[in-house]
């Protein structure tokens, strides 16, 4: 218990320090993304991955093998894939394929079976990319990651899976240290490196924790633990299809973007979504522990569906002719 607290505290402090130290090199290397006319360096993801790997790896070595070595290696591979995407803008199909390979290496097929194991791999891939999508607004990916990681840690502790519980606690602490720099206005961001690695480790850890349980109830628990990421992915995919856009084409159409359109501030939208994430994770943990019936789980996707249906009506896509007329008008004003 004490060693776990020390590991989490170390991860928090080291991540906060390393994210700040790496900020200047990231700016010089142009490893940045633009957010509302600000250039935000992507040093936070590298810091979270490096510290989580170091602290959790030390704990794994110290305990002579707690069963999370493979998950750490696979998560590191996904982090490198995300870092490559930050640098070279890889296609999403490449990210999905690489993540699927990593996921296929950590799913416990002896407990899930091949068919359910393949479904688990698909879910891990979806959640990994969904967490990458959450990194569109200050504080959101970090807050959702902290809540989801603590939820999976609680489920793992119930199953006496100390290795996964410890890893999730360290990850949650590292994301908390990152949030010290990522709260609005963000000084650093996760990027693909941090968001994909965090999403992958959380999703794969949740799958390992639920392995061997009923498929329907496990699906409900897994969705509840990652409700905000799941709702955001559902909203984006549905909205793009309804608008006749490619689902692979990016745009300002995520949960945070739409809440901002409704008048919420960036911190307000993040807090609202973090509250939703906490509510879903709490239901998931209680259901996993058997404290609430399986029927309670379906309130989470039901509420998420209501939110998606409500927010999909918020206009976020600007027609091209409108953009052209705005640019032309701007040019006329300047020339005049």
Image (spheres, rainbow, N blue to C red):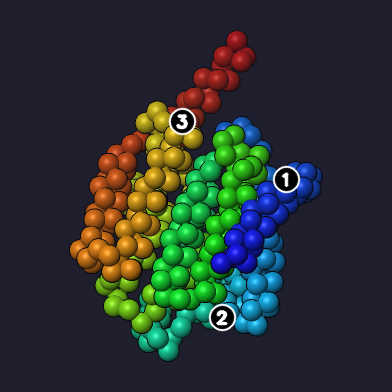
Residue farthest bottom in this picture: 110
Q: Earlier in the sequence, mark 3 or mark 1?
A: 1
- Residue beneath the point at 65% across and 83% down: 64
- Please provide percent x and percent y for residue 304: 30, 51
Q: Is residue 32 left or right of residue 252?
A: right
- Tag of residue 20: 1
Q: Nearer the viewer, mark 3 or mark 1?
A: 1
- Tag of residue 241: none
Residue farthest front in this picture: 2
- Closer-to-camera residue (97/127): 127
- Residue beneath the point at 57% across and 39% down: 183
Helix, strand or loop at mark 3: loop
Helix, strand or loop at mark 1: helix
Q: Which residue is mark 3?
A: 265
- Residue beneath the point at 45% across and 76% down: 160
Q: Which residue is mark 2?
A: 67
- Please provide percent x and percent y for residue 217: 28, 71
Q: Quadrant of the C terminus?
A: top right
Mark 2: few/some/many CA within 10 Å (<14, 14-19, 20+): some
For residue 242, say whether it is visible: no
Mark 1: few/some/many CA within 10 Å (<14, 14-19, 20+): some
Q: Nearer the viewer, mark 2 or mark 1?
A: 2
- Please provide percent x and percent y for residue 163: 55, 74
- Please provide percent x and percent y for residue 319: 41, 35
For residue 287, say whether it is visible: yes
Instruction: Give the alpha-carbon distance from disc 3 to disc 2, as whole Å.
Output: 42 Å
Helix, strand or loop at mark 2: loop
Q: Is residue 263 above or below residue 295?
A: above
């Amino acid at each position: 218990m004490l060693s776990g607290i020390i590991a989490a505290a170390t991860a928090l402090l080291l991540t906060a320090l390393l994210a700040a130290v790496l900020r200047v090199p990231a700016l010089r290397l142009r490893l940045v993304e633009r957010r509302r006319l600000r250039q935000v360096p992507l040093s936070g993801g590298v810091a979270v991955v490096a510290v989580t790997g170091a602290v959790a790896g030390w704990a794994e070595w110290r305990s002579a093998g707690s069963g999370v070595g493979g998950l750490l290696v696979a998560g590191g591979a996904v982090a490198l894939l995300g870092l490559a995407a930050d640098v070279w803008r890889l296609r999403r199909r490449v990210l999905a394929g690489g993540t699927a390979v990593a996921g296929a290496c950590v799913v416990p097929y002896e407990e899930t079976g091949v068919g359910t194991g393949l479904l688990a791999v698909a879910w891990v891939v979806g959640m990994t990319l969904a967490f990458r999508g959450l990194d569109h607004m200050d504080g959101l990916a970090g807050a959702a990651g902290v809540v989801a990681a603590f939820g999976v840690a609680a489920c793992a502790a119930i199953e006496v899976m100390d290795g996964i519980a410890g890893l999730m606690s360290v990850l949650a602490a590292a994301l908390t240290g990152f949030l010290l720099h990522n709260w609005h206005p963000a000084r650093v961001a996760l990027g693909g490196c941090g968001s994909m690695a965090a999403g992958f480790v959380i999703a794969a850890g949740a799958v390992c924790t639920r392995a061997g349980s009923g498929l329907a109830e496990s699906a409900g628990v897994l969705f509840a633990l990652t409700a905000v990421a799941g709702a955001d992915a559902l909203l984006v995919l549905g909205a793009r299809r309804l608008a006749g856009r490619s689902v692979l084409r990016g745009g300002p159409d995520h949960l945070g973007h739409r809440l901002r359109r409704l008048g919420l501030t960036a911190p307000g939208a993040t807090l609202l979504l973090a509250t939703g994430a906490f509510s879903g994770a709490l239901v998931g943990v209680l259901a996993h522990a058997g404290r609430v019936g399986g029927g309670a789980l379906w309130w989470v996707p039901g509420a998420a569906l209501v939110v998606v249906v409500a927010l999909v009506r918020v206009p976020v896509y600007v027609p091209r002719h409108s953009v052209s007329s705005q640019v032309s008008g701007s040019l006329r004003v300047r020339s005049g």
